[in-house]
Amino acid sequence: MKSEQSALQVRGLTKRFDRLAVDALDLTVRRGEFYALVGPNGAGKTTTLRMVAGLLRPDAGTVAIFGIDALAEPVAAKQMMAWVSDEPMIYDKLTPLEYLEFVAGLWGVDPEVAHRSARDLLVSLGLEPHLGERCEGFSKGMRQKVALAGALVHDPSLIILDEPLTGLDAVSARHVKGLLSDRVRAGSTVIMTTHILEVAERMADRIGVIAAGRLVAEGTLAELRQQNGRSDTSLEDLFIALVDVEAAA
Amino acid sequence: MSSDAALTWFARHELRLAWREWLAMMTGGRRRRKRAVAIGLIVFAAFMHIPAWAVIGRFADLRLPLDKSSLIVITASIFLAWALMLSQAIESVTRVFYARADLDLIMSSPVKLSNVFSIRIAAIALSITAMALLLSTPFVDVLVIVGGVRWLSAFGVVIAIGLSAAAVAIAATIVLFRLIGPARTRLVAQILAAIIGAGFVIALQVAAILSYGTLSRFAVLTSDAAAAIAPGIDSVVWWPARAALGDGEALLLLLLSVGLVLLGAVMAMFSASFADTAVSASVHAGSGPQDIRPKTFRGGSRQQALRRKEFVLLRRDPWLISQTLMQLLYLVPPALLLWRSFADSSTAIILITPVIVMAAGQLAGGLAWLTISGEDAADLVATAPLPPARIIRAKIEVVLIAIGMIFAPLVLALGVASPPQAAVTAVGVIIGATCATSIQLWFRVQAKRSQFRRRQTSSRLATFAEAFSSIGWAATAALALVVPTAAIISGALTAALLAATWKLSPRRG
């Protein structure tokens, strides 16, 4: 597959801290796809995505975002994507609207378009009563929603989310999932890590299972079942089986 | 566990937490530094005896009965120490209120809350007093060594004023809380803490300038006018001074009793409501004022968006407001001196230049840490489509613009009185602020703005370099006005210090 046809193409991505965190990883995510990256704690999911988002410099390998070499042209690559971490990083002393205004400004979005989009996003995430309040008193769920709205306000083509549903209540989680599905339907690409396998099972077009810094399995749920010879098993059972095999190896 | 045992256990727990927090402040949270910190503290304490001897050694032979002027000076010094302790105590109480920390655990535990919070109040008082004892030890040591053991009673006075300062701080913060609510109390308390700490000294300086045209505080304290309005020798006002001088154990015991009774009264009155206050504070900590929503988003470049964000955050930072206010307060005496100089063309006007340059350097260092290191959404900024160099440049611009906005009016006013001095001052402000900002840039670390209090522990080298840089450029600017040749040497030394700092900095590459 040519890199121009994929939203993300990672080749030989390697990162070592005290130990090898990501081990010559190859990963391709297609345009308009909802891709879930699952794996046990310390498998290298977050490190992989942080390298893709430009937050960590890889020791080796290449990252291409819509065909743009993200290591050689980071600014051009960043213009097309958004990053949301599991720990929402927002400014306590700004209101949600001010935060979104700042994000839109950083990505150079037309102010009028951004304002309309920001309001719609915040309203759809149930934050309308809090538009003028500073974020310092917000719960973790509310902060996560503000961070998510910030990621979407500049209409990125690639949305990278690291455990975005952590700390969200059921209603908020449904809002977020709905919003992400809408984005995928509108043509955006979503890559998400999650520990909630049910979410990956329901939402993702394809699922990648990562263990010890390597991609050990990848495909749709049906393909994963087929690869493992278990036709009617759940993703949870498949995941445990795959991770156990990797750990034994 | 019996009720008494539970309280003793909780008291030990509180003391352990206070000790560890202090240790973390000193070591920057690095365990391996404990030994180095212990050695450093011992060396520092030993070294502090030298300036203590220089400042206070000549007063060690003072004995009762004293004349009024001496009593006024000693009492004013004790009051200044009390004001500083009060300032520190207000800051501590505010921190206890607004940090949620273990509140949920304590509130859900099967213990009597009034008892638990009494202990917390006592722990605050104890930590304030312990810190005061630690800082006063070199001075009292000098007095004891030179003047005899009678001066040991000064330790008792320090304990008494520490206890009373803590009691007043707790009562004042809770009363403030009830009067103006949790949202505003934090800001007001921080500003109060800053003003109280500096206010007394500044007020004395202002009085000295208005009366005698000098910056010396002693001019007011030792004046005939002060002696004339001071109460009689037997007044209760002089008790702390007399107790410090070793005027009988009874007086000292009385002072200690007053401190303890005051603290006991505060515990009895407020411990029951302390829990409610703390809960309200932590719940409402965030519900600050509603901000007017912009009708539409503002346009501009990406750097403009960054600068706008930084200015909004700086404007809404309670620490910064209190610190700026304090810096401006420190500038009141020289400003007054400037105003008086219009009439009598006094050479004392030269003193204004180093004060302004020093204040600019110090404020720039704090601002630079907040904008460069204290980035709460580091991931967001790092993933923005903007080269890192432009992000840093925008942040530096914010620091320099803010410094310009604060100090330009002062320099302009100085320009009316003495254009050459204003020019030197302006250059000093620019160099001082640029150097302080550069040091923060070389030693930048990713941190939260709320960690500002601990910024000095992350790099002692940066802290000292920043202080010496500000002092060095202030001295250079002053010398440039009176002995230009000496200014060249002073400037070269300061530049060398900066070069050495850069060489040792982690961002050299």
Image (cartoon, coloured by chain):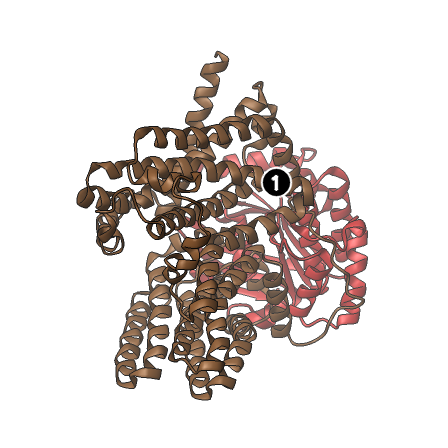
Chain colours: A red, B brown
Rendering quarter of residue B507 = bottom left
Residue closest to the far bottom: B420
| Residue B33: % across, % down | 30, 46
Q: Depth check: B418 or A151 in front?
A: B418
Q: Depth check: B118 or B96 in front?
A: B118
Rendering quarter of residue A167 = top right
Q: Which residue appears at 53% of the width and 82% of the height?
A: B412
The relative height of residue B214 versus residue B428 in the rendered view (above or below) is above
Q: Depth check: B151 or A168 in front?
A: B151
| Residue B180: % across, % down | 68, 45
| Residue B479: % across, % down | 32, 79
Q: Which residue appears at 58% of the width and 32% of the height?
A: B103
The relative height of residue B109 versus residue B409 in the rendered view (above or below) is above
* Residue occupied by mark 1: A195
Q: Which residue appears at 28% of the width and 36% of the height?
A: B246
| Residue A34: % across, % down | 70, 53
Q: Depth check: B87 or B369 in front?
A: B87
**In the rendered view, does B407 fall on the left or right side of A120?**
left
- Answer few, some or many: residues within 10 Å of disc 1's Cα (few below 14, many 20 plus, some between 14 and 19): some
Q: Mark 1: which secondary structure?
A: loop
The relative height of residue B425 versus residue A43 in the rendered view (above or below) is below
Please give the count of numbered marks on the rendered protein.
1
**In the rendered view, does B24 fall on the left or right side of B270?**
left
Q: Which residue appears at 35% of the width and 69% of the height?
A: B471
Q: Quadrant of the C terminus of chain B?
A: bottom left
- Residue B408 in sight in this render: yes
Callout 1 amino acid: His
The relative height of residue B23 versus residue B266 in the rendered view (above or below) is below
- Residue A2 in sight in this render: no
**In the rendered view, does B181 fall on the left or right side of B380?**
right
Tag 1, which chain? A
